[in-house]
Image: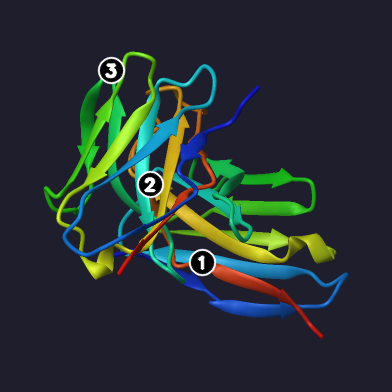
Amino acid sequence: DAGVTQSPTHLIKTRGQQVTLRCSPKSGHDTVSWYQQALGQGPQFIFQYYEEEERQRGNFPDRFSGHQFPNYSSELNVNALLLGDSALYLCASNRGLVLGYEQYFGPGTRLTVT
Amino acid sequence: GQQLNQSPQSMFIQEGEDVSMNCTSSSIFNTWLWYKQDPGEGPVLLIALYKAGELTSNGRLTAQFGITRKDSFLNISASIPSDVGIYFCAGRFDNAGNMLTFGGGTRLMVKP
């Protein structure tokens, strides 16, 4: 039973560019959340997708956008990259809105903006 | 910014020692979770707490949901080398699968 998978593992981009990160949820899960984890800090919630719609959003600018596909996989897009966007981006999945089904995290994508 | 304060930020352990860490919030949470993160990996769920006052164990780990709903504690008994890593508390306002607010983490290291 595959867990949450993310691609790519590492990515280096230049300031001003755009990036797309991908996530496949754990089998049986239909909800995907994205988190940004800066070095030495805890993860910060970006947004959550359920039934192909954004359900909740954290305190992140519109440069951060996402999408969920019918097979429940998800993409995170970041436009006009800033140096401060360098971080580990974590994807988490769970079975939506069911008590006791907590979020399982993937290994993350390490984004470096130069 | 983060609303959860974790302490200590880091600590050294010797094999066999008991370890305690805690997490406090200015806001009430209805769910408290504890995760462990190893280098190069995502956080792994250790314990989930859903009721104020609840005490839950997972092997050598025991966590409590504070009665004020503004704090939580994690204890590790008889630590072993593989306990090394970063422990995060996380709170959630509702009970079902929504956004988590994380603390800054407690880094556990082995005494040389």
Instruction: Determine whether A100 is above or below B39 in the image.
Output: above
**Mark linked to residue B100:** 2
**Which residue lies at the image location 24% right of the left edge and 36% below the top edge?**
A66
- Please give left or right for residue A23 compared with residue A62 in the image: right
Graded by Cα atoms within 10 Å as few (under 14), some (14 to 19) or many (20 or more), the crowding at tag 3 reads some
Residue type at mark 2: give it.
Leu
**Which residue lies at the image location 47% right of the left edge and 39% below the top edge?**
A6
Give the mark, 1 or 2, whose residue is nearer the N terminus.
2
Could you give the CA–CA distance between mark 1 and mark 2, rounded to whole angstroms? 14 Å
Same chain for the residues at labels 2 and 3, yes or no?
no
Same chain for the residues at labels 1 and 2, yes or no?
yes
Q: Which residue is mark 3?
A: A51
Q: Position of residue B45 (x, y in %)?
A: 59, 44
Tell me the subunit letter for badge 1. B
Same chain for the residues at labels 1 and 3, yes or no?
no
**Mark linked to residue B105:** 1
Could you give the CA–CA distance between mark 2 and mark 3, rounded to whole angstroms? 19 Å
Check disc 1 and report its element: helix, strand or loop: loop
Residue type at mark 1: give it.
Gly
Tell me the subunit letter for badge 3. A
Front-lying residue, A101 or B55: A101
Q: In this view of the protein, can residue B79 be seen by the observer?
A: no
Tell me the subunit letter for badge 2. B
